[in-house]
Amino acid sequence: MADNFFLDNLDLQYHLQQTDLRQVVALKEKNYSFHEKYPAAPRHYADAQDNYRRILTVLGELCATRLAPRAAEADEEGAQLRDGKVQYAAATQDALAALKQADLMGVMLPWAYGGMNLPETIFLMMTEMLTRADAGSMTVYGLLEIAQSIAEFGDDEIKARVLPRFARGEITGAMVLTEPDAGSDLGAVQTRATYDEAAQVWRINGVKRFITNGCADVAVVLARSEPESNDARGLSLFLVEKDDSVVIRRLEHKMGMRASPTCEVQYNHTPAQLIGKRRFGLIRYAMALMNGARLAVAAQAVGIAEAAYREAYKYAHARVQFNQPICNFPAVTRMLLSMRGEIEATRALMYEVARWVDLENALAHHIAATPKPDPADRQLLKRAARLAEALTPLVKYYATEMGNRVCYKAMQVHGGVGYMREFNVERHFRDIRVTNIYEGTSQLQVVAAIGKLLGHSLDDLLSEWAAQEYGEELAPLKHQIVEATELFNRSADHLKECPTEVIDYYASDLVDMATQVINSWLLLQHARADAKKKSIAQVYIGDQLPRMRGIVAAVQSADASPLQNRDTILASEF
């Protein structure tokens, strides 16, 4: 086993070096003035990059030497509910203790609350490594990101009381949204919040289901604050600190992520504090929470895929059949190449999306705090917000679907032994499955993305990339991507003229094409910057372009007959 999950990952190091966060960091660090008050704050961009590298290196060592060796143990024991109290697996407790000891809790929080003021991009790199080590334990750690939402939307009293405890690793967090009858349709939430005039606090009553780390010390809870409402406009967001009125009714018995407790939670007249304004709970605050969570799940999927690929690579070189390692067989080689290409393509997409999200957040805070903002900053914010909104569902969709494909192939490389508990790939295969379900299913990500794609919201970005000079050596690859882009645009225009139900039927095909085009351009840019990346670009583009041509044919036909005959077809066996 490697002794550092950052130093052994050249692609991750590449993204740390090449992702341009100069403007983001300068804005977040108030032009590096924080260093005067907080000595750990960076003095300039090179200093910030050095800090990020140090943090990732420390975490990489912990992941390799402390978390990964006990991941199977954490999965085997799982979280337990005893006498109404949730207890993490011993290995998970050790993982959290190690992260706390390394001062890696609350890293995205501002310096004023004991955090490190990290950009989202760097946190996603941490998430990816932690997941590669132990996906279940990472989920518990990753929910510390709700502290960032409290910092964003909470009042000064809440922030002063709660955030330093997150930064010190004294408390854990949970995002409490889902109910038995309100999963994807969060506007149907029925948990009630009523104001107790005598005590001058809100009281929450209701049951929440499928709550990751629902046993947390601090939770943000979506509840209906307007008694006459029945839609999203009646929902508000509340902060709840665990007490005896919060009852864990059960833990779900899950296929994977067993170290992470998934709880059914009952609130019994539980005291709570309003976060932000009433009625904005879902349409603003919870959506912001979920967008952050979707990026984290994308990073989670990349981390699991990386772990599964490495297991497959190692096994393929060690397993001898017919007097040679099975990695020598072209069929196995193709699976390994496909896995490597998809992982690096998805990582490129993820950190591109994270960069736009970071830029949007940094500019929004800067403009809000500036009496007379620069019009150029306003224009850039508008573009960053548009691209972040369009790209976030794409990366959540593509990364999690990719992770499932990679884990499937990784188990196939192992053959029969991969199906056995003794091999790590079996755990990765179980863990990955939930990623394209929770925090918004793949189908919901398609719904979120399709309107933007039909409206050509990515045209300026794609045109900008196409206008760049890639040199004679990369010209054939560029030609292929230009063709792919034209196919995508033609398909979008064709589908846009179809009836709504036909658009919905073929929407996932268009989303697949969009991500393949974006990934191809990103890999081509990397090939220009790093000669070693050319082979990855060739593998990925060579895999995807023929698939895109098939998708185009399907979209161009836009056959509505399956929809028209669905009742007959689907009921034919009953």
Image (spheres, helix red, strand yellow):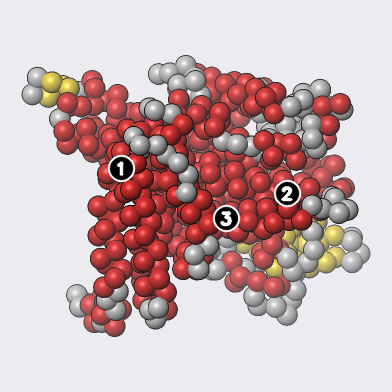
How packed mark 2 is, by other alpha carbons closer than 10 Å (few <14, some 14-19, many 20 or more), is many
**Residue at 51%, 51% in the rendered image:** 464
Label 2: element kind: helix
Judge depth for marks 1 and 2 and give the one in front.
Answer: 1
Give, as a three-letter code, the residue at label 2: Leu
Residue 67, compared with residue 378, is above or below; it is: above
Residue designated by label 2: 363
Q: Position of residue 326 (x, y in %)?
A: 17, 27
Q: Secondary structure at mark 1?
A: helix
Q: 502 or 174: which is nearer to us?
A: 502
User: What amino acid type is highlighted by mark number 3?
Assistant: Leu
> Which residue occupies the extreme front position in the image?
472
Residue under label 1: 476
Between the residue at mark 1 and the residue at mark 2, the CA separation in whole angstroms equals: 38 Å
Which tag is nearer the camera, tag 1 or tag 3?
Answer: 1
Q: Residue at x 17, y 22 (%)?
A: 325
Name the residue beneath numbered marker 3: 387
**Compared to 225, does 355 lie above or below?**
above
Q: Tell me residue 418's x, y (percent).
A: 26, 34
- State the separation of the CA atoms marked 1 and 3: 28 Å
Label 2 vs label 3: CA separation?
Answer: 14 Å
For marks 1 and 2 on the same chain, the one whose residue lies earlier in the sequence: 2
Q: Is residue 348 visible?
A: yes
State the quadrant of the N terminus: top left
User: Residue at point 74% right, 76% down?
Assistant: 227
Disc on the earlier residue, 2 or 3: 2
Amino acid type of the residue tagged 1 in the rendering: Pro
User: SS at mark 3?
Assistant: helix
